[in-house]
């Protein structure tokens, strides 16, 4: 008798229940997709951010590999000079040299301080390589600032004076208006042996 009662009941959904389920799920999905669309539209393009970072890292490597000594890099005393008076050729201890250019073959940038005030933007051809050739990133802009920045004493290491340490601040502005800022310190290695 019990088996007949169970057999008589039907299990499943009615057409109205199925339609209500589809409508509710559709409204929920539309809400979720609109939130996802809004957040992806307002977020920074990861390709532009990665390209900006690659440009910044490349130029920072170029700058930090330049010498930072009391004398000009072609001065015979550059590795041993302990004061500016020891230099045969003066001029590296006071900022960028106005006659040098990153792209020059006769007077190229050859010191960290030479990059102070350097910039690349759409008005001067966009991002260019060291040979002054366009790299295809015309929508990007770069500015470089180099200034003396002392470093405090850490553990047993002595403090580094402001004239013996430079802070290099490099800003890359992408075509979307977002910027990437990269900073690095460069300390003077002279009168120690050249690396």
Image: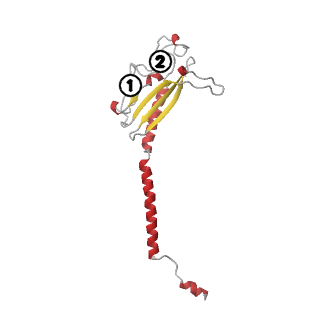
- Graded by Cα atoms within 10 Å as few (under 14), some (14 to 19) or many (20 or more), the crowding at tag 2 reads few
Q: In which quarter of the image is the C terminus?
A: top right
Looking at the image, residue 84 lies above or below residue 27: above
Q: Mark 2 points at which residue?
A: 94
Front disc: 1 or 2: 2
Q: Residue at image x 57%, y 84%?
A: 6
Where's residue 104, x and y in %? 38, 22
Q: Residue at image x 43%, y 35%?
A: 172
Q: Name the residue under label 1.
A: 103
- Tell me the quarter of the picture where residue 105 sits: top left
Looking at the image, residue 188 lies above or below residue 39: above
Q: Which of 73 and 177 is in front in this view?
A: 177
Where's residue 149, x and y in %? 53, 25
Where's residue 155, x and y in %? 65, 28
Q: Residue at image x 40%, y 38%?
A: 174
Find the distance from the CA under tag 1 to the CA under tag 2: 21 Å
Where's residue 15, x and y in %? 44, 76
Q: Nearer the viewer, residue 19 or 46?
A: 19
Q: Earlier in the sequence, mark 1 or mark 2?
A: 2
- Tell me the quarter of the picture where residue 142 sits: top left
The extreme bottom residue here reads: 1
Q: Residue at image x 53%, y 27%?
A: 185
């Amino acid at each position: 008798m019990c088996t007949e009662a169970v057999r008589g009941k039907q299990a499943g959904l009615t057409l109205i229940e199925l339609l209500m389920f589809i409508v509710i799920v559709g409204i929920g999905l539309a809400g979720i997709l609109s939130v996802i669309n809004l957040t992806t539209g307002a977020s920074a393009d990861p390709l532009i951010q990665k390209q900006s970072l690659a440009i910044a890292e490349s130029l920072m490597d170029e700058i930090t590999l330049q010498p930072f000594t009391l004398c000009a890099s072609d001065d015979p005393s550059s590795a041993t000079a302990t004061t500016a008076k020891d230099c045969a050729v003066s001029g590296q201890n006071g900022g960028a040299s106005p006659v040098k250019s990153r792209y020059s073959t006769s007077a190229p940038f050859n010191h960290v301080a030479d990059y102070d005030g350097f910039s690349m933007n759409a008005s001067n051809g966009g991002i260019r390589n060291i040979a002054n050739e366009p790299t295809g990133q015309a929508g990007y802009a770069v500015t470089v600032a180099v200034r003396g920045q002392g470093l405090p004493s850490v553990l047993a290491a002595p403090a580094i004076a402001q004239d013996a340490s430079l802070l290099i601040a490099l800003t890359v502005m992408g075509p979307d208006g977002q910027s990437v800022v990269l900073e690095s310190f460069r300390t003077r290695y002279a009168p120690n042996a050249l690396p």
